[in-house]
């Protein structure tokens, strides 16, 4: 489980942070969007877990997942935190939700630091938006991407709070810190 966390969470957070940073960079209301995406960083892991406990709740009146299922005619509620293997991904969503804002802020600053001359030269050479992003911008901010990835990977090693609050390490969600606490 620790290995899965160390791969999925940094990859998803960094990718989503880069995506949001790029998409909101030229929008007039982009700063508002960035503020909203950054807000979960201000919440503790336990607080975020309690918020997501409501999202994952069995009761269709409380839990978002079961409310959506009820809208589509599924009457039997499911407890996503008890589905083996997949429950780890539902727990990872919490940390991805928190860390995407961090990645977005750092990567947005890196994207703004790219010299305009480089971008203008690529456009004059006929680069389309995809080529501009993947062949010009991403290589120039690769060091920042590595720093963000590494920082989030180190944070993943401290993920005990989310797992303990949501499942207590039960249902196959045990990670090294929760395993150590049992002994």
Image: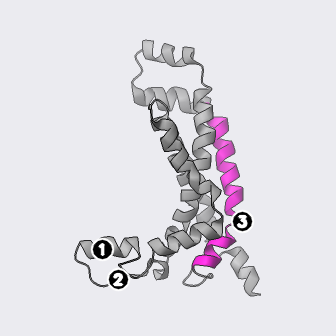
Distance from disc 1 to disc 3, alpha carbons, whole Å, reads 33 Å
Residue 7, numbered label: none
Comparing 138 with 25, the one in front is: 25
> Which circle, 2 or 3, is nearer the viewer?
2
Check the image and name the residue furthest to the bottom.
183
Q: Which residue is disc 1 drawn over?
A: 69
Judge whether residue 29 is colored magenta: no
Magenta-drawn stretch, dominant element (helix, strand or loop): helix
- Percent of width and height locating residue 126: 40, 16
Quarter of the figure with residue 172: bottom right
> Which circle, 1 or 3, is nearer the viewer?
1
- Label whose residue precedes the other's in the sequence (2 or 3): 2
Distance from disc 2 to disc 3, alpha carbons, whole Å, reads 31 Å
The 10 Å Cα crowd at callout 3, few under 14, some 14 to 19, many 20 or more, is few
Relative placement, left or right, of 6 versus 28 is right
Q: Which residue is disc 2 drawn over?
A: 77
Quarter of the figure with residue 160: bottom right
Residue found 70% across the figure and 81% down from its top: 179
Can see residue 2? no
The region drawn magenta spans 141-166
Quarter of the figure with residue 176: bottom right
- Percent of width and height locating residue 34: 53, 43
Residue found 48% across the figure and 80% down from its top: 84
Residue 158, numbered label: 3
């Amino acid at each position: 489980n620790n290995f899965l966390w160390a791969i999925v969470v940094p990859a998803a957070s960094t990718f989503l942070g880069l995506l949001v940073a790029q998409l909101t960079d030229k929008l007039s209301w982009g700063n508002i969007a960035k503020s909203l995406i950054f807000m979960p960083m201000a919440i503790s892991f336990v607080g975020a877990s309690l918020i997501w406990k409501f999202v994952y709740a069995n009761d269709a009146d409380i839990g978002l997942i079961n409310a959506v299922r009820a809208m589509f005619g599924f009457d039997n509620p499911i407890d996503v935190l008890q589905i083996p293997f997949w429950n780890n991904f539902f727990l990872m969503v919490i940390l991805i939700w928190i860390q995407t804002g961090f990645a977005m802020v750092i990567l947005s600053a890196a994207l703004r630091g790219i010299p305009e001359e480089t971008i203008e030269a690529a456009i004059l050479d006929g680069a389309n938006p995809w080529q501009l992003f993947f062949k010009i911008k991403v290589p120039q901010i690769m060091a920042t991407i590595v720093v963000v990835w590494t920082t989030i990977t180190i944070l993943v090693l401290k993920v005990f709070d989310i797992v303990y609050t949501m499942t207590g390490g039960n249902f196959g969600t045990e990670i090294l810190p929760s395993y150590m606490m049992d002994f």
